[in-house]
């Protein structure tokens, strides 16, 4: 960890990454205003999980941008510190019970600094019209959770 940069290994990019990015751009959803439907989803996820942070995260070439947030959180973060990028790469749900002890995330800037991520659960967003994962619906807590 040096000047806010993470030395966390980046998620492995998929062979179809260029097509995934084209699909994301064609969706015309990046950098759009908040929408009640998305806001309702993250509010429900936060309420049901009991986690203080819930997000709809869309991962583009250099950042993850949050279409919806159930919390005070920046509008975007760098892709290099994105837990959701690992969901995009694997196209599978990711559960991290304690990020401080997880080998891939323990030195992540979002773990060592604000918001102090400890537990992360992310589920891939794969629209029925495509085979590409555009981002993740996730919930985050600042305390670890047991397996």
Image (cartoon, helix red, strand yellow):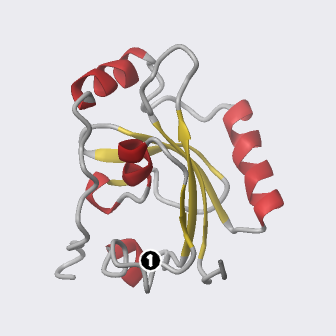
142 sits to left or right of 63: right
Residue for badge 1: 114
Q: Nearer the viewer, residue 96 or 45?
A: 96
Q: Is residue 102 above or below residue 28?
A: below
Q: Position of residue 42 (x, y in %)?
A: 70, 48
Quarter of image, res 103: bottom left
Quadrant in which the N terminus appears? bottom left
Seen from this angle, which residue lies furthest left?
2
Name the residue at 53% across, 41% down: 124
Quarter of image, res 81: bottom left
Q: Nearer the viewer, residue 145 or 116?
A: 145
Mark 1: give few (<14), some (14-19) or many (20+) Cα within 10 Å.
few
Q: Is residue 138 above or below residue 62?
A: below
Q: Nearer the viewer, residue 115 or 122?
A: 122
Element type at mark 1: loop
Name the residue at 77% across, 41% down: 40
Q: Position of residue 127 (x, y in %)?
A: 55, 23
Q: Position of residue 100 (x, y in %)?
A: 44, 85
Q: Is residue 44 visible?
A: yes
44 sits to left or right of 103: right
Quadrant in which the C terminus appears? bottom right
80 sits to left or right of 99: left
Q: Is residue 46 above or below residue 112?
A: above
């Amino acid at each position: 960890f040096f000047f806010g940069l993470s030395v966390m290994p980046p998620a492995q990019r998929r062979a179809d990454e260029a097509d995934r990015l084209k699909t994301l751009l064609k969706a015309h959803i990046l950098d759009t205003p908040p929408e009640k439907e998305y806001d309702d989803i993250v509010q429900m996820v936060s309420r049901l999980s009991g986690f203080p942070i819930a997000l709809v995260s869309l991962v583009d070439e250099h950042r993850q941008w949050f279409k919806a947030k159930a919390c005070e959180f920046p509008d975007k973060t760098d892709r290099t510190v994105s837990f959701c990028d690992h969901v995009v790469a694997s196209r599978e749900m990711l559960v991290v019970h304690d990020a401080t002890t997880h080998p891939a995330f323990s030195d992540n800037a979002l773990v060592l600094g604000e918001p102090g991520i400890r537990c992360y659960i992310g589920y891939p967003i794969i629209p029925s019209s495509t085979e590409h994962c555009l981002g993740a619906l996730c919930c985050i807590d600042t305390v670890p959770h047991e397996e």
